[in-house]
Amino acid sequence: MMKFLSWTCTMCFSAHHGKRLNLYVLTLDGKVVASTDLSKIGMIHTDEQYFIRGQRGSVGDIFYLDKNKVLMMQLAAPLILQNKILGVIEVTATAQAITSMVTDYCHR
């Protein structure tokens, strides 16, 4: 099931204008259980700000430059089912990819 979810996420995000996007689904103990980057599955992210803050609510103000000096953005939010927090979902993307998605959505 998780491999299918990871594959589906990869297809969906990779198809979006070829921009760099990665999606991560983390358990409450910070373990990556599904991702568009299969090499990240099993990693622990309990100390990451997006994970800590993403358990409490939506996060959209984490920016950094990657190793190639590309502006990156992290978005995170709790995964909630029937008022119970199951984990955190996180998207890391180039700022250009986020801008492109918002622009595409606004012009539909």
Image (cartoon, rainbow, N blue to C red):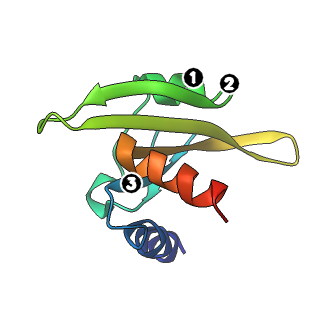
The quarter holding residue 48 reads top left
Q: Is residue 19 left or right of residue 66?
A: right
The quarter holding residue 76 reads top right
Q: Residue at x 32, y 37 (%)?
A: 72
- Three-letter amino acid code of the residue under disc 3: Asn
Q: Which residue is mark 2?
A: 56
Which residue is at the far left? 68
Q: Which mark is residue 22?
A: 3
- Labels 2, 3: front one: 3
Q: Which residue is mark 1?
A: 53
Tell me, yes or no, whether the two marked residues, 2 and 3, touch with CB atoms within 8 Å: no
Query: Is disc 2 placed on a helix, strand or loop?
Result: loop
Number of other residues with Cα within 10 Å of mark 1, as a class: few under 14, some 14 to 19, many 20 or more: some
The quarter holding residue 18 reads bottom left
Q: Is residue 76 left or right of residue 68?
A: right
- Three-letter amino acid code of the residue under disc 2: Arg
- Three-letter amino acid code of the residue under disc 1: Arg
**Residue nearest the viewer, comparing 89 with 67:** 67
Tell me, yes or no, whether the two marked residues, 1 and 2, touch with CB atoms within 8 Å: yes
The location of residue 33, given as percent across then percent down, is 47, 55
